[in-house]
């Protein structure tokens, strides 16, 4: 089981190791509780993956996932999410998948809109998960996250030991998972 998010979490992810799956799995748990999720992304999540993760969730519950696919217009999607938060009282999670480009510095306008969204989610006590690509620091070694001032920054990357094992580093712990068709499960 994935950790529960409180406040704002920036998830910095090694490319291709399951950042979107983490977000979808967290969204699935919220939908299971019959609550709403706002999901902002550049492009729709993979249909096959979505089907695998949401196979046991009723269509009525899945309909409470508000998907906003914005292409390159992340700032507009974030502003739409902020507006939704102001009119809907039953949102229990906001996810911004790939909130910034995989390389280079984040655009200052996107950072500002993300901070505005974070203020709105904090005011309404709604968890925010912002997902972006991590990068390796060539000088110091180790993973780094793009600059985004939320409550916590977590890192997700592949294990050096097994290709399907993932390590999630939170402020408090390193948790090992296995990635399968149903998402992430704790490693035994």
Image (spheres, rainbow, N blue to C red):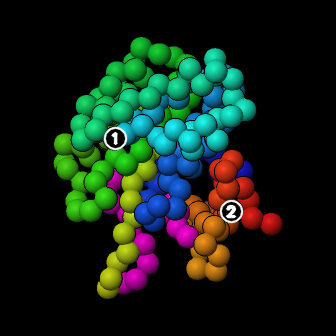
Q: Which of marks 1 and 2 is nearer the N terminus?
A: 1
Q: How crowded is mark 1: few (under 14 residues within 10 Å), some or many (20 or more)?
A: some
Check residue 42 in the rendering and tell me which mark sits there, or answer none: 1
| Residue 41 seen from this side | yes
Residue 187 is situated, as x and y percent measured from the top left of the image, at 75, 65
Q: Which residue is drawn at 38% across and 75% down?
A: 136
- Mark 2 — residue? 178
Task: Determine whether 104 is above or below 162 in the image.
Answer: above
Residue 141 is situated, as x and y percent measured from the top left of the image, at 40, 83
* CA distance for labels 1 and 2: 26 Å
Residue range (magenta): 140-158
Residue 105 is situated, as x and y percent measured from the top left of the image, at 22, 59
Q: In this view, does 176 lie to the left or right of 111?
A: right
Q: Residue at x 57, y 65 (%)?
A: 169
Quadrant, the C terminus = bottom right
33 or 8: nearer the viewer:
33
Residue 150 is situated, as x and y percent measured from the top left of the image, at 41, 49
Which residue extends farthest bottom?
139
Q: How crowded is mark 2: few (under 14 residues within 10 Å), some or many (20 or more)?
A: some
Which residue extends farthest front?
48
Residue 116's quadrant in the figure?
top left
Label 1 close to label 2 by CB (< 8 Å): no
Q: Which residue is drawn at 26% across and 46% down?
A: 111
78 or 171: nearer the viewer:
78
Q: Residue at x 28, y 38 (%)?
A: 71
Q: Is residue 93 left or right of residue 12?
A: right
**Circle 2 sits in a helix, a strand or a loop, which is it?**
strand
Residue 141 colored magenta? yes
| Residue 125 seen from this side | no
**Circle 1 sits in a helix, a strand or a loop, which is it?**
loop
């Amino acid at each position: 089981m994935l950790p529960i998010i409180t406040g704002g979490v920036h998830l910095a992810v090694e490319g291709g190791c399951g950042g979107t799956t983490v977000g979808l799995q967290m969204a699935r748990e919220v939908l299971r509780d019959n609550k709403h999720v706002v999901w902002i992304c550049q492009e729709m999540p993979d249909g096959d993956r979505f089907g695998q993760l949401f196979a046991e969730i009723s269509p009525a519950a899945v309909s409470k996932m508000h998907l906003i696919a914005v292409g390159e217009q992340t700032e507009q999607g974030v502003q739409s999410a902020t507006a939704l938060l102001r009119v809907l009282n039953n949102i229990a999670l906001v996810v911004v998948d790939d909130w910034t480009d995989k390389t280079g510095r984040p655009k200052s306008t996107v950072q500002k809109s993300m901070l505005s969204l974070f203020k709105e989610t904090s005011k309404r006590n709604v968890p925010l998960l912002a997902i972006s690509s991590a990068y390796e620091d060539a000088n110091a070694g180790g993973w780094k996250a793009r600059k985004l001032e939320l409550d916590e920054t977590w890192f997700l990357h592949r294990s050096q030991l097994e290709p399907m094992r993932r390590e999630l580093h939170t402020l408090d712990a390193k948790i090992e998972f296995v990635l399968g068709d149903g998402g992430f499960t704790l490693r035994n």
